[in-house]
Amino acid sequence: MYRHYNNNQTSLTLPLEISISETHIVRAISAFVDTIPYKLVYGEESAFGRPQYSPLMMLKMMLFAYSRKVFSGRKIQQMAEENIPMKWLIGDPDVVPSYRTINRFRTDPQTTKLIALMYLQFRQSLIDNNLLSDEAIFIDGTKILADANKYSFVWRRSTEKFESKLDQKTRNLFKDLIQNKVNLAVESEMDPTDLQTLEAEVDALDTEIDELDQQIKTEKVIPGGSPRKQRRRKLKHLRHLVRDEYLPRKQKYRQYHEWFGDRNSFSKTDHDATFMRMKEDPMQNGQLKPGYNLQIATQSQFVLYYQVNQRPTDQRTLIPFLKAMNFAQTPVNYIVADAGYGSEPNYQFVKEKSGKIPLIPYTMYLKEQSKKYRSDLSKVMNWEYHAEEDYYVDNHHIRFSYHA
């Protein structure tokens, strides 16, 4: 016997509520978001236009969609139309926010503050439920691919190389202007490669060319050609070099250095992204791609802190990450991380500045524990050391002393 099936939509149903399992994740999401104080969520309401959607409802939708690995605004709207748990979060089966509303909500600056507040509230909830301890905090990172063109890279060394060639050209042009007796009206101490000097050169050439234009209009025809026209032709060529080539390139390189900061690369389509090797490399060719280094600090499998870094290596992200943490709210005794964070500056910062105990192996720790490494007499670590006279003796009985 089969169950009765009728798709003609002729039956009359009166659903009074949407049934969701007691253990479904949307119940946890809803209960957590509802703990955020009302005054901190709702700002000043607009007196005009259509009523706004509740920020709590929008935040619940975003959290549930992200937990299902759905990040597109259109797909989140589709979930609101078709997904029963999402309808339960919204509270009204007929209400479906558009993808434009969803995208505006998550890009709003107020939402950024709300997410930071949500992290504080989440951490406080963990403390209230005795899910955190003062024993240790665990730090790890992962690299995420930026939404940028992978062939839009700009490298610092290439920029510096081409800029040095440009500076040499501007110095030569400065000498040409002096030889052509152009009144630059600049101080002799000014650098010919500086932007202000290049702009002053353009102004001086414009003035000189305008004066020649007025003189050429009133002069008579000169057999063999006018010297003023020859001079004007030369100055126009120099002005073209400065105004249309040297000055824009210098401005571009100056902007590049501002975007570089202390990095060695950035993407033209995402200036904050740095080119780095990703963990997932389908082509297995080590190709550098624009991305970010996401650092997280966890305890009991809960993420307590996070930070998005532009550094490709974990060693250089630990100190700024620890500075951003509030150990007064989450006091711990140990900082635990893998060997990728092992370095002397990191050990000193954790012990002296943070007052914690670092449980971080140095880079060669695991390799030094292997039998092959310990039996390799070509390694300096395996040589015989004499502390009294401070020298090593290798496997060939050759003595190596330290000389300053």
Image (cartoon, rainbow, N blue to C red):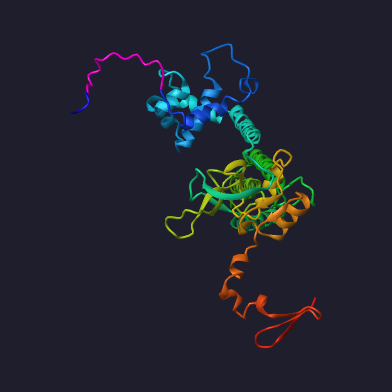
* Residue at the farthest top position: 47
**Residue 98: where, in percent of width, then height?**
44, 24
The part of the chain drawn in magenta is 5-18
Q: Residue 347 falls in which quadrant of the image? A: bottom right
Q: Residue 43 falls in which quadrant of the image? A: top right
Judge by depth and name the residue closer to the eye, 162 or 148: 148
Residue 165 sits inside the magenta stretch: no
Number of marks in the image? 0
* Residue at the farthest bottom position: 397
Instruction: Give the residue at x 70% y 46%.
Output: 332
Q: Main secondary structure of the magenta part?
A: loop
Instruction: Give the residue at x 77% y 46%.
Output: 186
* Residue at the farthest front position: 1
**Residue 276: where, in percent of width, then height?**
55, 54
Judge by depth and name the residue closer to the eye, 99 or 370: 370
**Residue 267: where, in percent of width, then height?**
55, 47
